[in-house]
Image: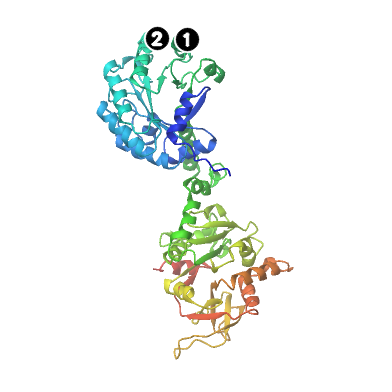
């Protein structure tokens, strides 16, 4: 029987890249999301660059970001990825004692190694007047390496010693002298840095070094050097040290300029990552799964919200976004409704979107698409999410808001299926889904055991008992029946024009549907008058 092998520790992965024959590459990242992108791209390791981390924070690469701030950011990067991170640790943020503490903290955060450079604290970036900078005392720096190696608990944790001898103009002899001293002090690899536009320094160094210890290079300035040349020189690791942040700066600046110039984001949507991609990189799906597992009641009921329509009656308000995204008291309708459901421990929520669907993306719900929203009805939208019709399910519209007591009454219903009917809605001239029930609303009894007879599209309460609020609760016994009916109805010639009331009327033929009456406590935002009224919804 084959047993699944446990993945290698991050430290071991990095150690193997440094010590096994062949050339390896790691790429810069400066926060959690860029680290995840680097891993998904296929890189085997990440360079947590001091330049780009400080740059992402908007400060200079002069130790202006404290070591604890860097540590916190790198912890997010480590949590977001499964490949090793080599931290650009500058000078170690102080003397040997500072490095000892840093190594301990990095190991506790599963960071695979740290690179320290032989300059003075606080450091200055190598490419800013490097010839005016000073090297650290050789013996002091060797002591720092030894202190770090003595402190680490994981034998595979890597300390890479970086010599800046070429940067400050000290030359080949000094670079070799320091590299050998660092090797003997216990460094796991030597990073040889150069700012020349050709790899002359590196080639001269490698010729004399004779492959006695792993060598790391950072070809930021000699970027045109063919990769095969690094292989010929027996380089162990190449670091692409700052390109991810630099490319992001270019893209961010262009987007900002375009948005500013046009006073609109419309032209940007086809050029940039969708919001759903950000949610994916953040791991939103895992949270949804965890909520289903751990939230009280989260696995007992789910919700399907139908929000594919534009809401043409709202005119200019919905030219750029769907009706469900209109703000009510500073929060989009759909967000307010989803929050209400989540407050009732309904964490499994699906939204069927259509018009301007890019607006309806959130880690709080999964999305289904009705791309034919402009020529189909509500039932066609529900059909797109039919796989969710199992277990206890609430089906509702995405342009409604409800008081929490209405939703609680719905959840507590023991019936096979339940609808909420408003006994006092009427007037205003718009077409409604009117409910005809076995008994009318009355204050004389608790309104128990009232059944729905049918729903009918009308604009008057004259003969009906109330208006259906758009809320339908299906039990675990009823939802499979509803799905079967939905799939059967999909074969009808008029299916694309049908609404949820048509499904409810068919469902009524199979088992009773309980009616729970309400008097107000909800609002359907269908036109400008509704939207204005919703502004007073608290």
Secondary structure at badge 2 equals: helix
In x, y percent, where is residue 50? 37, 30
Q: Nearer the viewer, residue 63 or 470?
A: 63
Spatial separation of the CA atoms under disc 2 and disc 1: 11 Å
Q: Please provide percent x and percent y for residue 110.
A: 39, 38
Specify the color scheme. Answer: rainbow
- The residue closer to the viewer here, 498 or 317, is 498
Question: Which residue is drawn at the image coordinates 46% and 37% (left, top)?
Answer: 35
Q: Which numbered disc, 2 or 1, marks the residue that appears first in the sequence?
A: 2
Where 352 falls versus 230 (above or below)?
A: below
Kindly identify which numbered label has been placed on residue 207: 1
The reply, left or right, for residue 64 in relation to residue 260 is left
Q: Position of residue 521 (x, y in %)?
A: 44, 75
Vertically, is 493 above or below 212? below
Disc nearest the viewer among 2 and 1: 1
Residue 62 appears in the picture as rendered? no
Residue under the point 62% across and 63% down: 386
Residues under numbered marks 2 and 1 in contact, where contact means CB atoms less than 8 Å apart: no
């Amino acid at each position: 029987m084959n047993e699944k092998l446990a993945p290698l520790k991050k430290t071991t992965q990095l150690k193997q890249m440094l010590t096994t024959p062949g050339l390896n590459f790691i790429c810069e990242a400066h926060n959690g999301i860029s680290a995840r992108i680097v891993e998904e791209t296929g890189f085997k390791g990440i360079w947590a660059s001091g330049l780009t981390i400080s740059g992402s924070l908007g400060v200079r690469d002069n130790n202006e970001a404290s070591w604890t701030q860097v540590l916190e950011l790198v912890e997010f990067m480590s949590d977001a990825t499964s490949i090793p991170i080599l931290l650009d640790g500058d000078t170690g943020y102080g003397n040997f004692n500072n490095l000892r503490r840093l190594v301990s903290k990095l190991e506790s955060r599963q960071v695979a190694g740290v690179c320290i450079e032989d300059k003075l604290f606080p450091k200055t970036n190598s490419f800013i007047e490097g010839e005016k900078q000073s090297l650290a005392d050789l013996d002091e720096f060797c002591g720092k390496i030894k202190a770090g190696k003595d402190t680490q608990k994981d034998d595979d944790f890597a300390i890479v010693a970086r010599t800046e001898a070429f940067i400050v103009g000290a030359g080949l002899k000094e670079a070799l002298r320091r590299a050998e001293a660092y090797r003997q002090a216990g460094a796991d690899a030597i990073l040889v840095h150069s700012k020349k536009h050709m790899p002359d320094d590196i080639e001269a160094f490698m010729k004399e070094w004779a492959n006695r210890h792993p060598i790391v290079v950072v070809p930021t300035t000699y970027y045109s050097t063919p990769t095969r040349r690094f292989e010929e020189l027996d380089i162990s690791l190449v670091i692409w040290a700052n390109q991810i942040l630099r490319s992001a700066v270019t893209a961010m600046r262009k987007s900002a300029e375009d948005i500013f110039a046009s006073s609109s984001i419309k032209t940007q949507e086809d050029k940039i990552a969708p919001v759903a991609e950000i949610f994916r990189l953040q791991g939103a799906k895992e949270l949804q799964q965890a909520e289903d597992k751990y939230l009280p009641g989260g696995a007992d009921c789910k919700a399907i919200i139908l929000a594919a329509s534009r809401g043409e009656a709202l005119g200019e308000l919905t030219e750029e976004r769907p009706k469900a995204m209109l703000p009510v008291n500073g929060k989009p309708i759909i967000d307010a409704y989803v929050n209400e459901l989540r407050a009732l421990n309904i964490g499994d929520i699906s939204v069927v979107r259509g018009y301007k669907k890019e607006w309806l993306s959130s880690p709080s719900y999964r999305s289904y698409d009705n791309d034919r929203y402009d020529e189909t009805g509500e039932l066609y939208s529900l059909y797109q999410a039919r796989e969710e019709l199992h277990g206890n399910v609430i089906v509702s519209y995405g342009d409604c808001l409800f008081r929490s007591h209405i939703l609680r009454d719905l959840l507590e219903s023991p019936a096979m299926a339940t609808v909420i009917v408003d006994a006092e809605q009427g007037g205003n001239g718009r077409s409604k889904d009117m409910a005809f029930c076995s008994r009318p609303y009355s204050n004389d009894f608790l309104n128990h055991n009232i059944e729905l007879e049918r729903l009918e599209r009308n604009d008057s309460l004259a003969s009906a008992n109330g208006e259906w609020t758009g809320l339908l609760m299906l039990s675990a016994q009823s939802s499979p029946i509803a799905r079967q009916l939905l799939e059967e109805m999909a074969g009808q010639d008029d299916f694309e024009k049908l609404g949820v009331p048509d499904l409810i009327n068919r469902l009524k033929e199979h088992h009773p549907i309980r009616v729970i009456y309400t008097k107000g406590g909800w609002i359907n935002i269908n036109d400008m008058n509704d939207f204005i009224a919703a502004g007073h919804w608290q």
